[in-house]
Amino acid sequence: MKKPNLNLKRASVLTSTLLCSALLIAAPLRRELNEGWKFKQARLNNWYPATVPGVVHTDLMDNKIIEDPFFRLNERSMQWIDKEDWVYQTTFHLTPEMMERQNIELVFKGLDTYADVYLNEKKILEANNMFREWRVVIKPHLEAGENVLKIYFHSPIKVDIPKCDALPYQYEASNDQSENGGVFNKKVSVFARKAGYHYGWDWGPRLVTSGIWRPVYVEAWDDARLNDVFIRQQEVNKNCATILGEIEILADKEIEKANISITEASSGRVLAGQSVSLKKGMNKMSLPFSIRNPKLWWSNGLGEQYLYDFRTDLTIDNRTADTQTKKVGLRSLKIINQPDKDGKTFYVELNGVPVFAKGANYIPQDNFLPRVTREQYEKTILDAANVHMNMLRIWGGGIYEEDVFYELCDRYGILVWQDFMFACSLYPAEGELLENIRQEAIDNVKRLRNHACIALWCGNNECNDAWFNWGWQKRYKKQNPEYEQIIWKQFNDQYNVTLPQVVKEYAPESFYWPSSPFARYDGGSDDHNGDRHYWEVWHGKKPIEMYNKERSRFFSEYGFQSFPEFESVKRYAPCEEDWNIYSEVMMSHQRGGAHANELIETYLLNEYRKPRDFEAFLYMNHVLQGDAIKTAIEAHRRDMPYCMGTLFWQHNDCWPVASWASRDYYGRWKAQHYFTRKAYRDILVSPIADESGILKVQVVSDRLKSCGGKLEVSVIKLTGEVLNQYNRNVKIDANSSRTLFSIPLEEALNGARKEDVFVHAVLSTDKGKNDYANNYFLVKQKEVNYPHVMITKSIQPIEDGFEVTLNSDNFARAVFIATGDANSSFSDNYFDILPGSSVKVEVYTDLPQNVLEKQLKIVSLSDEY
Ligand code: BMA
């Protein structure tokens, strides 16, 4: 289990340049403007203190003007905020040393969204895209003493409603909750280059923010500075990495002689160096170099995540004018999308090896983005790495993530499927707006292209499928064929021309995929080409066992809903009257509506028996969700190499809600996340009975080397009697999926009834060091004859908590342990205890032993009926 790395470099705008500025006289000076800010409603006069970076909702909360929007029904009374304009203001002095520099610029890493910026009452910028960075020359407008920086944020709703009203047609935006925002059917989200989920989603509230959401700083420099460094990996293999350092230098005058070099910081070895003359303006140069026998970067589970520190130095007159260090993992990464006998493949090839992608879809961690801490980022990525994920998909309705997200993915080996920020909508992509989109793409491709973790760039989420398969194209055509043509042209210009051009120009070795899911340019997705979002289980109401039948070359989405666990529910719905999934409060935290609740209930009663109360319902909902996704993951892995990826929907929540997430907003793992940890291990042992009455055990290995092992398959009564036990010595091929055991089920059952037994398969490998176990049931959970269980516990103190040993007389299914409202975490949960056996769990908690003894709740499935 990987633990947080406390020494992780702080991701801030103040990176190496600032550190060096103390030592090197000429280096650019930077000063973050994060102090002294105040804000007000534009049409009123009361100023309040503000936090920068931040957004208006959190500032209103900090000043006790509004309550927590996530609590009970509070979101509803906060819809006025996005219809107001807001003003943020601060004053600053620059040191004489900064003021003396020839060039002084103001840099905004992010403004949300329609922002007019004034310096000393002079308008210096009109920003209109949350995802772009803005840099303004301010030297001419600066005062030697106090400077006033004021930012006027226009209501994104008021700015965009007229654009919506002016059109004879509407742009589709299926998740925009305009009614909840009090603007009827005016789906304005498509007009703003702003995170789509702010306007509501089927797991998210409508809270449309404004604010200085990323750092703002002043940068002062003389002569020249490094504008950008791209460590372009042209070809990497185990013998050699061929690299081009593509460097942009901005000079304020002609400089006859400068020197540029790239050094491997840890060894001090200079890899490339060149003497150059600089012209006034932007200078672009390429420094080729190679590294023999490079240490390669691997995704989680396949090897080390080695990162080189490449330092680029710009020297003028023997003084370092600027320096930048990039941490870079060297790897060859390709997406193999080639015709084969079944259709067209879709998989990651890393350092020449086909990699089965195991992971999840990721949405922003909060509606109020700037308050997500580094610790939360680290936990989020570790919660992926520690359940053996190797990929996260940054979904297109959120944001291009913070730098720290990608640094952590580089560090822990999580490949990133990066969507551009477009989802489930059509966008007015022409003229200025298309140019705005192009600039946004350039900013973000340039910002992220050095990260080893970036696996691919993808045009959007589901827009292509929506056009062809959800009836959108037909609807426009019916309304007016001209509208269909206009919108399709914009669509094509955006996803099939502009975005791929940007990727080709700024990250030439990267792969661009027009949409997710995608199969071909003239139609929707399918099951034998490209990637697929499979929602027939859940949205399509198909039975869970369909996961065992449906195929794809790469499942980039599928999911199953659950509510958060009871302790989490109590934080946002604390009143007893709330404790019913149809209560007003619970419904407001279920954005799939009553329909989604009914789906959970229907699936639950199809698969399990009736839970005895609300709390039991929440627990059983978790087991249901966990079992469903476990079924899907195992099926997808068994189907490799036809299928080469499985990313469930979704890794996290942005507020407390019923959703498809496997961890709730407060970071608590649901059953699904614990089940995922087992299902995503490097080796999967997956028993399954097929329709012809054969019980087989399939073993899937992601390892790059073959290994031997002992496979033991037992058919056991839930009360403990072993009916049959089979032992096989097996060889497990590298990167393979094979059936290593099969037997007629009748024979294995030995006359026992399916309802009374479970199949237990264990593979022991690596000289007995590793056991891979799995339990399998031959009937639906509601038909299993779970006997009543007696679980006894004993508790031993350990560092940071206690070791709890649980013993059960009979088979105990999905044993859930909880410590009430205490903030505890568990080494495992929702685990099975075999009849007459024990399981040891570590509980990390602040509770003293006597309180834990009293408070520890232990539940298993048979108790909850
Ligand atoms: C997928 C996503 C999201 C959505 C989820 C659940 O298709 O792309 O837009 O939230 O389904 O419905």
Image (cartoon, rainbow, N blue to C red):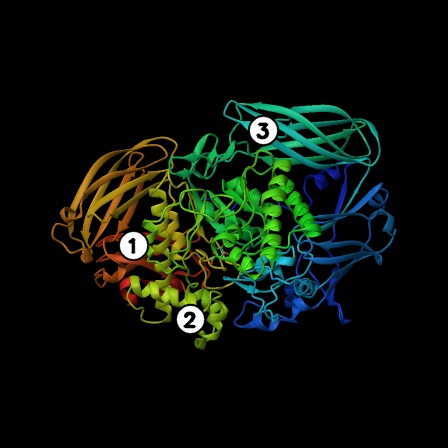
How many badges with numbers are in the image? 3
Is there a contact, CB below 8 Å, between mark 1 and mark 2? no
The alpha-carbon separation of the residues under discs 2 and 3 comes to 54 Å
Neighbour tally class for label 1: few under 14, some 14-19, many 20 plus, Cα within 10 Å:
some
Residue 196 x, y percent position in the rendering: 59, 57
Neighbour tally class for label 2: few under 14, some 14-19, many 20 plus, Cα within 10 Å:
many
Disc 2 element: loop
Q: Amino acid at mark 2?
A: Ile
Question: Nearest the camera: 11 or 86?
Answer: 86
Q: Which badge, 1 or 2, is on the more N-terminal residue?
A: 2
Q: Is mark 1 within 8 Å of ligand 1?
A: no
Q: Amino acid at mark 1?
A: Asp
641 sits to left or right of 811: right
Q: Which badge, 2 or 3, is on the more N-terminal residue?
A: 3
Residue 722: which disc? none
Q: Which badge, 3 or 1, is on the more N-terminal residue?
A: 3
Residue at 66 percent of width and 32 percent of height: 311
227 sits to left or right of 375: right
Residue at 81 percent of width and 27 percent of height: 317
Residue 234: which disc? 3
Where is 293 relative to 104, above or below? above
Query: Would you name the residue on which mark 2 appears?
Result: 581
The alpha-carbon separation of the residues under discs 1 and 2 comes to 27 Å
Disc 1 element: strand
Query: Would you name the residue on which mark 1 appears?
Result: 832
Residue 409 x, y percent position in the rendering: 53, 43
Q: Amino acid at mark 3?
A: Gln
Nearer the viewer's eye, disc 1 or disc 2? 2
Where is 165 relative to 193, above or below? below
